[in-house]
Image (cartoon, rainbow, N blue to C red):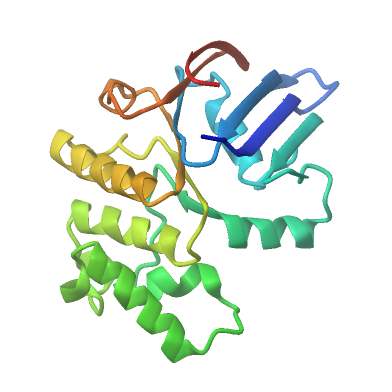
Amino acid sequence: MSTEIIIETANTTKIFNKEKPDEVIAVNDVSIKINRGDFVVFKGPSGSGKTTLLSMIGCMTRPTSGSIYVKGKDVSHLPERFMTMIRRNTFGFIFQQFHLIKGVSVCENVMLPLYPTDIKPSKLRKKAEEILHNLGMEGRKDFPVQRLSGGEQQRTTIARALINDPDIILADEPTAHLDTNLSEEFLSIMRGLQQEGKTILIATHDPLVYEKDYINLIIEMRDGRVKNIIGKQ
């Protein structure tokens, strides 16, 4: 069966405060390839560069040098408006902190990534409600997010990441503040999304994540470099 490379980094480097006394090389000459449908873990201690690499792949920051290809397109040197379009159309983001907007409903939080949009509000709301239903959250759609449990907040965050029907889901330390049961629930949802054809990228140092047998690619990082790649490449 043929495979499609959906993400490729080529000699990608990210330097903060370049040529200053506090210069930090966060990512150092990283070249990797990720196929469509992969379940990938970027594994490494704090400061290893995995979060910075994830943010560059997701078009949230640019590399200092090297290139990043998403679906065959070099996105690292595009004007900001095009990077914004690629972020919106290609990626769903799940952060370590939930970053939910207090004072508004679950459904409104889920709809936020598509504002402003040409989609009619009624159609957008229907789409959000369908995603919440699939995640078992239909009974909470009109709740203010501050009244949700931790697990419900996590599912709301996942729903928000799915509102644009992304090909690629990026998650940064998503289990860092979750207990074992909620972490397992999160991973089960991610596994289901992978089986639907989505590509999953998770940055973590949690063994509960990277020891799962369905993770097919583990990229170990330390000091900004890739130290080991386990799985198909």
117 w.r.t. 213: above or below: below
Name the residue rendered at 54%, 72% in the picture: 114
Name the residue rendered at 66%, 38% in the picture: 56
38 w.r.t. 218: above or below: below
Work out whether residue 175 or residue 219 is closer to the camera in this orientation and state it.
219
Q: Position of residue 109 (x, y in %)?
A: 39, 70
Q: Residue furthest top?
A: 227
Q: Position of residue 153 (x, y in %)?
A: 27, 57
Q: Is residue 61 left or right of residue 142?
A: right
Q: Is residue 149 left or right of residue 34?
A: left
Placement of the C terminus among the 4 image quadrants: top right
Q: Is residue 63 visible?
A: no
Q: Residue furthest front?
A: 1
Q: Is residue 57 left or right of residue 214?
A: right
Work out whether residue 206 or residue 129 is closer to the camera in this orientation and state it.
129
Name the residue rendered at 68%, 44% in the picture: 70
Work out whether residue 85 or residue 80 is closer to the camera in this orientation and state it.
85
Q: Position of residue 200 (x, y in %)?
A: 44, 41
Q: Is residue 205 visible?
A: yes
Q: Position of residue 217 (x, y in %)?
A: 45, 24
The image quarter containing residue 58 is: top right
